[in-house]
Image (spheres, grey):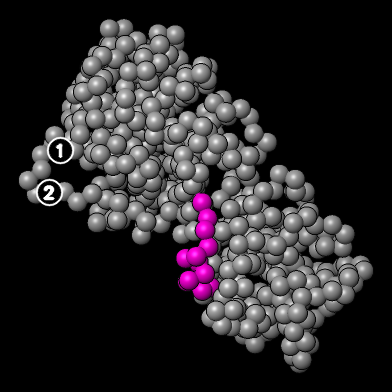
Amino acid sequence: MKIFTTSQIHELDEYTIAYEPVASLDLMERAAQKFTKAFIREVPSSHRIFIFAGPGNNGGDALAISRLLTAENYAVETYLLNNKDQFSVDCKMNKIQILSLIHSHFHEIKEILPAIDIRKEDIIIDGLFGSGLSKPVTGLATDFVRLMNASGAKIYAIDIPSGLFGENNEQNIPENIVKAYKTFTFHSPKLAFLLPDNAQYTGEWTVLDIGLHPKGIEKLQTDIYFTEKTDIVPLIHHRNRFAHKNNFGHALIVAGSRGKIGAGVLSAKACLKSGAGLVTVHVPACGEIIMQTAFPEAMVDVDKEMNLISEVNKIESFSAIGIGPGIGTSEKTKAAVERILLQYKKPVILDADALNSISQHREWLKIIPAHSILTPHVGEFDRLAGNSTGSYERLNKARNLAVECNCIVILKGAFTAICLPNKEVHFNTTGNHGMATAGSGDVLTGLLTGLLAQSYAPAEVAKIGVYIHGLAGDIAAEKYAWESMLAGDIIENIGKAYLSLH
């Protein structure tokens, strides 16, 4: 799915109006009907509904929704912000329609917001401002926003919470943004919805298809995407009946130090579960018995050091290498990481302490093999690229790093962002907060390494690996409470994730 900027969404609306063709008022009615149907499925008519509308097209949506809910026998109180006597054409038309209703409870607010008795059990529909907003909310509109947020009632936002910008909110005023319980957004999520800083405003969000013109969508260019199942299925390799294990690569996992051998176990298991033919795990000597016992399917290569990794030999023979889970950042280990980067000529997977080692020697960024995959969580990324003021700046830094190093940066989190060296960003749609558990990243490292060993292109490795990792976590979440999920539960369900794609 393409993710468009708010200005591009406006272009797409205009294209639909011109080439469907459809009147802009009818397109607004279509959006209002979609919102109303979704709302009715969730909120019974026993609730009092308060609708707050602004003077633009988002307000027009709100007025149309008010009319539609009134026709469905909801008790609706509608408040229209009119501090400048300037309305969009379609908002004005919907105002005329709502005034013609016998049973409408409609209030036009021009100067002072009156006292409104909103209780916690009531429901608010926010339609003050849409995605075209470019400046922080000020004046009388601020009173509307703060009234909604202070009410304690559940707020359903139309398309986007009022006050929230569609992309960059670093210069916004947080207290002047509606904090929605749920957002019903039109056509596709806004970029802001995919950034962690804004979750407090959007709440849960659902995309409603309002039938924008498919040719307009096809023509409009973007470099931001939302990865869905239909994007992943065509990428999965089909296996020859007569294939054998050597056809699917031999992966090397470099992982573990004293007390953290489990990181190697998790990575190795996920690596073979990804479909790799063979996996060797290089661990300190103290991890040999643990690895052989915990995961007999893996081969073990033992370091000369007892408690840490100091040297990895004969790396050229491996199809792919994953480095970092639990290895620590001792001087000997950092030297081993540097030697691998200098000697191995194919892409590698870099995670955890491999990234922390590079952050202490940023000149090593220049020796990372082209098209390698870096998998930092937020803390690791900030150590690597410097602190960011917010998630929008951090995303742009990740995009720049991918271009600078000619590598792929997987910025882990909800809606994990895959930043490619061609400047594209692919946000992931699978996964859940039960995956925020020790070892989850080690599982991802193993998955990615196994896919890379099977000769998938690095960009495909990143998209498939992150998607399957999250999907396996979603399948696990159907069995367990989020609070009790373990990294091993993700590994256990990788096979079921593949089955759902087949």
Dot 2 falls on a residue whose secondary structure is loop
Which amino acid does the dot numbered 2 rest on?
Asn
Task: Give the residues drawn in magenta, as a range.
Answer: 212-223
How far across and how far down the image is residue 248, in percent? 18, 38
**Can you tell which quarter of the image residue 439 is in?**
top left
Which amino acid does the dot numbered 1 rest on?
Asn
**Can you tell which quarter of the image residue 336 is in?**
top left
Dot 1 falls on a residue whose secondary structure is helix
Q: Label 2 near label 1: C-beta < 8 Å?
A: yes
Q: Is residue 382 visible?
A: yes
Mark 2 surroundings: few (<14), some (14-19) or many (≥20) residues within 10 A: few
Residue linked to disc 1: 247
Q: Is residue 259 above or below residue 117?
A: above
Residue 42 magenta-drawn?
no
Q: Residue at x 44, y 11 (%)?
A: 330
**Is 357 on the left-hand or right-hand side of 257?**
right
**Distance Cα–Cα, label 1 vs label 2:** 10 Å
Quarter holding the C terminus is bottom left
- Farthest-out residue, left: 242
**Number of numbered labels in the structure image:** 2
How far across and how far down the image is residue 414, in percent? 50, 45
Mark 1 surroundings: few (<14), some (14-19) or many (≥20) residues within 10 A: some
- Farthest-out residue, right: 111
Residue linked to disc 2: 240
